[in-house]
Amino acid sequence: MSNLSYINQAGKSGVKRRSGGDGCGHAVAHGLAVERVRRNRPGDETACELAELFKAFGDPTRVRMLNALHAGELCVCALAEALEMTQSAVSHQLRLLKQMRLVRARKEGRSVFYALSDDHVHLIFSLALEHVMERH
């Protein structure tokens, strides 16, 4: 028999509570909170996209690039010089960031300028940086 049992108190059928004393004992009280979480949880595709977004922030090189672009638009050669990287390496990372919709490109003649794609990316980066800097 499973260690999950159903309870039906106060009209809350289908609420699961672990038997065996490993739960907090407030399954009925948590019913509304659990339902709210279930209603608002992202679908599988959205959860995967969100995980990919956070993965972009998991690489120090991309974080430095996002930081540079947070300050303003730059061409590949200026970004490469500022980060002391090759243009090829910068282009490779920019391609990934563009696929993740974190940066956008603008052509001007033969030059391509990159910037953070929108205000959401600026805000995500600012808040993440502020959160990390709280420890310092």
Image (cartoon, rainbow, N blue to C red):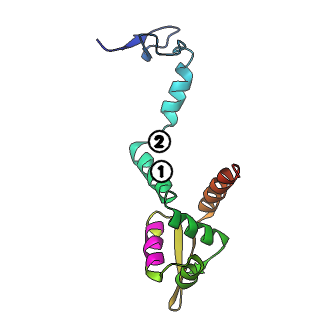
Residue extending furthest toward the left: 1
Q: Residue at x 51, y 26 (%)?
A: 35
The amino acid beneath tag 2 is Pro
Residue extending furthest toward the top: 9
Q: Main secondary structure of the magenta part?
A: helix
Q: Quadrant of the N terminus?
A: top left
The amino acid beneath tag 1 is Leu
Within the image, what quadrant is residue 3 found in?
top left
Q: Are marks 2 and 1 in contact (CB under 8 Å)?
A: yes
Q: Residue at x 52, y 58 (%)?
A: 57
| Picture mark count | 2
Q: Residue at x 62, y 59 (%)?
A: 125
Looking at the picture, how far across and down is residue 31, in whole percent? 53, 19
Residue extending furthest toward the front: 136
Q: Secondary structure at mark 1?
A: helix
Q: Residue at x 44, y 46 (%)?
A: 47
Residue nearest the observer in this picture, 37 or 81: 81
Looking at the picture, how far across and down is residue 91, in whole percent? 45, 77
**Circle 2 sits on which residue?**
42
Q: Secondary structure at mark 2?
A: loop
